Image (tube, rainbow, N blue to C red):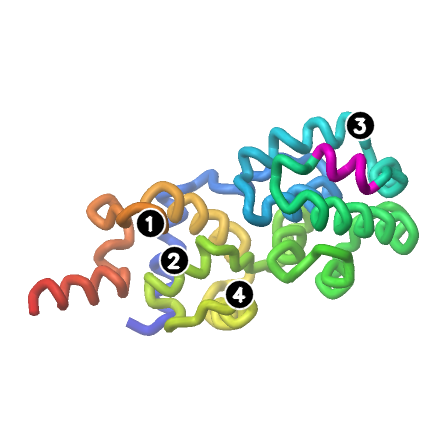
Amino acid sequence: MEKKELALKIIDRLKKEYPDAGCTLDYNDAWKLLVSVRLAAQCTDERVNVVVKDLYAKYPDIDALAEADVNDIEAIVRPCGLGKSKARDISACMKMLRDEYGSKVPDDFNALLKLPGVGRKSANLIMGDVFQKPAIVTDTHCIRLVNRMGLVDGIKDPKKVEMELWKLIPPEEGSDFCHRLVYHGRAVCSARTKPRCDQCCLCDICAKVGVDSKRTAG
């Protein structure tokens, strides 16, 4: 099966399996998603969703957070880990939004990449979820699963995986596809436990299952 055909089959099946999949970080404004995705590095979304409640209660908008003492930000976000660097990035990012973008989040991918603490994964998440533009978010679930499924071959670098997926995934499907990979990676194709291949809606087309079956037969 060609990779493009495989990609379309995977998209179709994941749509049926996870019809309502979306971002698991809570937000009601673009800048809040920027903050949350920075805090989510090496931290669970569940914990981030709890921690940001206190952060936004004290600093309810971009200007307030830009003016906040970085040590005060760190004191609140410390439970997410890497508190010092995350607080520094959040402070610098909010200052840049205030000073250069009129306290608004730009809807341009390259402009987002210039913001402190914002990489390709974060920028794609903002583009897809906030601005409904084509996006592919190559987080750890995405990278692990697309390699396992056979959409990419042994590529672990996030940008390289993203570039390969752009060749295979219809632009309008990219954002939702990546969210569904997160759901599937947590529920079925886990990294921490043995994948539940017998419960997987992709088991008959997954490259990894095919390889394992051949090894067992041999």
Residue in the image at 77% along x and 37% along y: 73
Q: Which residue is mark 4?
A: 158
Residue in the image at 86% along x and 38% along y: 68
Q: Helix, strand or loop at disc 2?
A: helix
Q: Quadrant of residue 149?
A: bottom left
Q: Does the magenta portion include 67?
A: no
179 sits left or right of 108 in the view: left
Q: Which residue is mark 3?
A: 58
173 sits left or right of 185 in the view: right
Q: Mark 4: which amino acid? A: Pro
Mark 4 neighbour class, 10 Å CA radius: few under 14, some 14 to 19, many 20 or more:
some
Question: Which percent across, then down, holds residue 215?
Answer: 13, 67
What secondary structure predominates along the stretch shown in magenta?
helix
Q: Helix, strand or loop at disc 3?
A: helix
Q: Quadrant of residue 16?
A: top left
Q: Which mark is residue 145?
A: 2
Please identify the residue farthest to the left as the structure is shown.
218
Q: Helix, strand or loop at disc 1?
A: loop
Q: CA distance from mark 4 to mark 1?
A: 19 Å
Question: Which percent across, then down, holds residue 80?
Answer: 61, 39
Q: Quadrant of residue 148?
A: bottom left
Question: Which percent across, then down, holds residue 103?
Answer: 87, 46
Q: Is residue 133 above or below residue 77?
A: below
